[in-house]
């Protein structure tokens, strides 16, 4: 069982920045793909972007050059740097991990609230 723990959320004003962190209990040697998702009130969960074991990032259109996903070398920790936050970014942000070895599996963090006030 892989455990994902998010941190760094909170309440901010529009235009502010915030950095979320996700720490995975899985080995850094695993070729996992990690991702950030978010779910706004009354809406479906949507992808923000993914980052693979080698640090290659793929962003969803909603990232709009305001969000940057990165990882810490040698450990399974990823970050979501959010800038110029808007009220529409208010959501619960989830960390996700997809494992391929030794078998396919998917894990979710508990989610962390980000509230942006205009």
Image: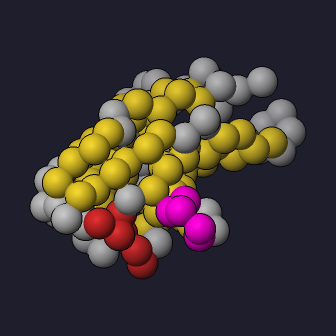
Give how far across and how far down residue 53 sits, in percent: 53, 43
Q: What's the coloring here? A: secondary structure
Q: In the picture, which quadrant includes the N terminus?
A: top right
Quadrant assignment, res 110: top right
Horizontally, residue 3 falls left or right of residue 78, namely right
Quadrant assignment, res 13: bottom left
Give how far across and how far down residue 52 sits, in percent: 53, 49
Horizontally, residue 71 falls left or right of residue 5, namely left
**In the image, residue 42 lies in the stretch drawn in magenta:** yes
Does residue 83 lie above or below 80 as drawn?
below
Residue found farthest to the left:
15
Quadrant assignment, res 113: top left
Q: Nearer the viewer, residue 93 or 101?
A: 93
Give how far across and how far down residue 61 sits, in percent: 42, 78
Give the main secondary structure of the magenta stretch.
Answer: loop
Query: In the rendered image, is residue 50 in sight?
Result: no
Range covered by the magenta-colored residues: 39-43
Looking at the rendered structure, the number of numbered marks drawn on it comes to 0
Residue found farthest to the bottom:
61
Give how far across and how far down residue 73 sits, in percent: 38, 30
Q: In the picture, which quadrant includes the C terminus?
A: bottom left
Who's the residue at 34% across and 51% down the image? 115
Who's the residue at 61% across and 45% down the image? 96
Residue found farthest to the right:
103
**In the image, residue 76 lies in the stretch drawn in magenta:** no
Does residue 44 lie above or below 81 as drawn?
below
Horizontally, residue 58 falls left or right of residue 64, namely right
Who's the residue at 43% across and 67% down the image? 59
Does residue 74 lie above or below 50 as drawn?
above
Does residue 113 lie above or below 63 as drawn?
above
Q: Nearer the viewer, residue 24 or 118?
A: 118
Who's the residue at 54% across and 46% down the image? 94
């Amino acid at each position: 069982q892989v455990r994902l723990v998010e941190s760094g959320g909170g309440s901010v004003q529009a235009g502010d920045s915030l950095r979320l962190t996700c720490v995975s209990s899985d080995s850094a040697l695993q070729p996992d793909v990690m991702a950030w998702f978010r779910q706004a009130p009354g809406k479906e969960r949507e992808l923000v972007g993914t980052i693979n074991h080698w640090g290659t990032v793929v962003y969803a259109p909603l990232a709009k050059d305001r969000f940057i996903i990165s990882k810490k070398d040698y450990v399974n920790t990823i970050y979501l740097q959010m800038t110029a936050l808007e009220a529409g970014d208010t959501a619960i942000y989830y960390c996700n991990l997809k494992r391929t070895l030794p078998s396919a599996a998917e894990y979710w963090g508990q989610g962390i609230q980000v509230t942006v006030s205009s």
